[in-house]
Image (spheres, grey):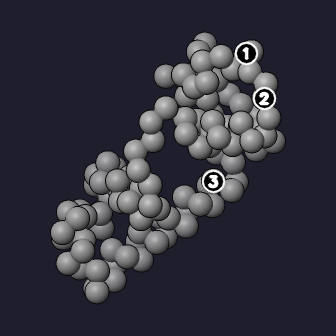
Amino acid sequence: MGLPILQEDSHLTYGDKIVYPKNIETCQISEEKINHWANIAWIDLRKKQIEYWMKLVNLMYKEISDPKYKLINVERNFQKLNGVEDLGEVLAFLYSISGGNRKKL
């Protein structure tokens, strides 16, 4: 798919091609650029990112189980989330509570 996987200690696993940046072989690589690429186009499995996703998932479960958010959940069509049957709905919810928008390269 061209999506590199970034792990701790800047260990990068990738296949025959990298979608972004296309010219990684000739780029000047820095920690700032690695963080930028990981944020917009790579699969970031570093501890800090995993902790961030765990925080979002915990927030999601807290919100959908709180009765005062019942109308919000129905309005957002998240009533199926209690069984986590629809991964797309879960991801959409996580992005919405993180203030995120669709990332474009």
Indicate the secondary structure of the residue bearing disc 2. loop
Mark 3 or mark 1: which comes first in sequence? 1
Q: Name the residue under label 2.
A: 29
* 90 displayed left or right of 27: left
Q: Which residue is drawn at 60% across and 13% down?
A: 16
Mark 3 or mark 2: which comes first in sequence? 2
Identify which residue, 32 or 86, lies in the foreground: 32
Say if 84 sits above or below 16 in the image: below
* 18 displayed left or right of 93: right
Q: Residue at x 65, y 40 (%)?
A: 36
**Residue 7 shows in the view:** no
Q: Mark 1 points at which residue?
A: 25
Q: Mark 3 or 2, which is nearer the eye?
A: 2
* 32 displayed left or right of 42: right
Q: What residue type is labelled 1?
A: Glu
- Horizontal and vertical percent for residue 62? 42, 77
Q: Which amino acid does label 2 sit on?
A: Ile
Q: Which residue is drawn at 44% across and 36% down?
A: 104
* 17 displayed left or right of 28: left
Q: Mark 3 points at which residue?
A: 49
- Horizontal and vertical percent for residue 96? 38, 60
Indicate the secondary structure of the residue bearing disc 3. helix
**Alpha-carbon span between mark 3 and mark 2:** 20 Å
Identify which residue, 98 or 28, lies in the foreground: 28
Q: What residue type is labelled 3?
A: Gln
Say if 17 sits above or below 78 in the image: above
**Alpha-carbon span between mark 3 and mark 1:** 25 Å
Say if 3 sits above or below 98 in the image: above
Identify which residue, 83 or 49, lies in the foreground: 49
Q: Residue at x 60, y 18 (%)?
A: 22
Say if 48 sits above or below 67 in the image: above
**Residue 23 shows in the view:** yes
